[in-house]
Amino acid sequence: MIAKIEKSVLHGEVTAPPSKSMAHRLLLLAALSGGRCKVDNLAMSQDVLAMIDCLRALGAAIEISENSAAVDGSNLLKSVSDRLDCRESGNTLRFLIPLCLTACKDISLYGSGRLMDRPQEIYEQLCREHGFLYKKGDGFITVRGDLKPGVYELSGSVSSQFISGLIFGLLSLSGDSEIRIIPPFESRSYVDLTLSAIKKFGGSVHFKDEYTVLISGKSLKPADVVCEGDFSNAAFLDAFNVIGGSVKVNGLSDNSVQGDRIYREYFPKFIDSAPEIDITDCPDLGPICMALGALNHGCKLVGTRRLAMKESDRGRVMHDELLKFGCEIDVKENSITVPKSNLHSPVAPLNGHNDHRIVMSLAVICTVTGGEIEGCEAVSKTFPDFFDAIKSLGCDVKIRND
């Protein structure tokens, strides 16, 4: 699909979509609680549907009704499929591998897009150390194990998803466990998000110190919960305020522990300066920060190493796409410099690279320059209503099939 966007200045109010990151956690914890729960305020994006399908394959009963899900976890892990389809969802894959390691049978987790190219070595090492099966095939990973309560060490330098995933797996067991995190500990805020979700179900998981997590197994209780608004996707809506628009984004909690809430501190810096911003703990903000730098006074992003491990190599593809607007960014291993630029209409159709955050970042730029984005359907991964949302704010956008 192709999105054709005309120059537009956006105004009005819009509600932030539900948090995909929190939705994954709440759905999984509802299933782990062993009882009946309801999770409200869900956006049925491709990533959320992947988690729902995989939990069903692991034995949970889940009924979807508009923007909510009724979850019955009483049969979780009692009747387990040998195949889970994670689609392109990194959260789903990494959150569920440790849980699969408690099933004592071969389970293959499949993925599409670049999912299986993203790093999984931390779990491979865990399996090797404990004598579990870990076999990587063409588009899938097969695991088998007998995960027990105990003391585990995990690197914190790749993705906090591995730490959260092991917490979920250990929560399903009877007994206490400990995770010792080997520094550096990147994206700590996402583990904090995991702990805040666990508290909603009465679970007992806490930090003993900066690098040690204590887990009380089988401590979860069924609960009805509401998914909070998503700062990660709200950033693409709030970005219009940095380029001359006037947009109020509702539905975000001031008490949220989502790491990407930091965008509220970062974005005003683009208006009057060329800021240097560390995105080590908020890599999903990388593409939109590059877009805002190109539209304003430039910027330098540091801590960008993990952008290469996402749905696309985000530094490289933003280099290629911004070049079409007349802006050549400098992409290094762990930093990206965006020069002050006078952007023009793109000289060729833009490519979304099957990456929702690339598509949304390019859409923000196109409201200033105009342009067409091929592969715009990638937004369905986490924010299927994105184009409807910006249209409601006055964006002149038309969607057509290829």
Image (cartoon, rainbow, N blue to C red):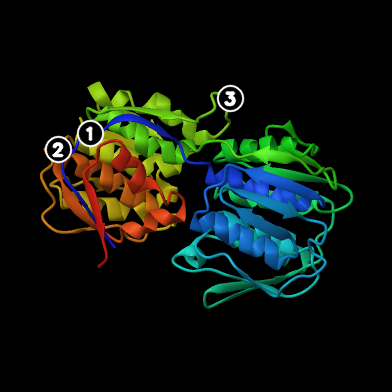
**Is any part of residue 20 visible from this angle?**
yes
Residue at the extreme right of the image, as rendered:
175
Element type at mark 3: loop
- As displayed, is residue 183 above or below residue 381? above
Amino acid type, callout 1:
Gly
Q: Residue at x 60, y 39 (%)?
A: 227
Q: Which residue is mark 3?
A: 255
Q: Tell me residue 182's x, y (percent).
A: 65, 44
Q: Residues within 10 Å of mark 2 (few under 14, many from 20)?
A: some
Image quadrant in which you'd find residue 185: top right
Label 2 to label 3, Cα distance in Å? 37 Å
Q: Is residue 82 left or right of residue 173?
A: left
Q: What kind of residue is marked 2?
A: Ser
Determine contact: label 2, label 3, CB under 8 Å.
no
Spatial CA span between label 3 and label 1? 31 Å
Alpha-carbon span between mark 2 and mark 1 = 7 Å
| Quadrant (top left/top right/bottom left/bottom right) for the C terminus | bottom left
Disc 3 marks which amino acid? Answer: Asn
Residue 180 is drawn in which quadrant?
top right
Residue ID for mark 2: 341
Is 201 in front, or is 223?
A: 223
